[in-house]
Image: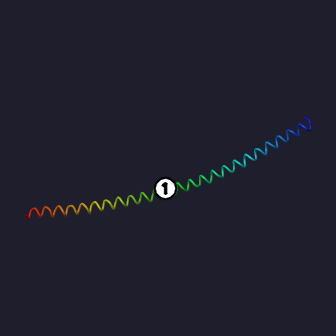
Amino acid sequence: MTNEEIQRVMEFVVKQQESFADNMAKSEERTANLERAFVGLFNLVTDIGKAQKALTERVAELAEAQAHTDRRVNALIDIIEDQRRDGRSQA
């Protein structure tokens, strides 16, 4: 192999190494971007989970309050019906 051929091979190898290094840098940048996006999504999912838990607890509280209201309304209905029956029986 002549010196000129060796020089061309060396230049080719150097260019390949430069290309590889550039591609590695781009890949590392993409990986860093993906990691940031993943962390953002993870935080979002975590926040949504916390909100879902709070909402579930609030719905349970509302359901209990509704059941309490239903019991009170039913008691009031019973009182009114008893008064109507008593009013009819006295007339």
Q: Name the residue under label 1.
A: 49
Q: Residue furthest left?
A: 91
Residue displayed at 72% across by 47% down: 24
Residue displayed at 73% across by 46% down: 23
> Based on the displayed image, in which of its 4 quarters is residue 88 positioned?
bottom left
Q: Where is residue 74 in the image (x, y as percent from the top left)?
A: 24, 60
Callout 1: SS: helix
Residue displayed at 85% across by 38% down: 9
What amino acid is at disc 1? Gly
> Based on the displayed image, in which of its 4 quarters is residue 73 positioned?
bottom left
Against 8, residue 28 (above or below) is: below
On the rendered image, what quadrant is the N terminus found in? top right
Against 77, residue 6 (above or below) is: above
Q: Where is residue 4 in the image (x, y as percent from the top left)?
A: 91, 38
Residue 90 placement, left or right of 72? left
On the rendered image, what quadrant is the C terminus found in? bottom left
Residue displayed at 49% across by 56% down: 49
Against 55, residue 15 (above or below) is: above
Residue 65 placement, left or right of 11? left
Q: Position of residue 33 (x, y in %)?
A: 64, 52
Disc tally is 1
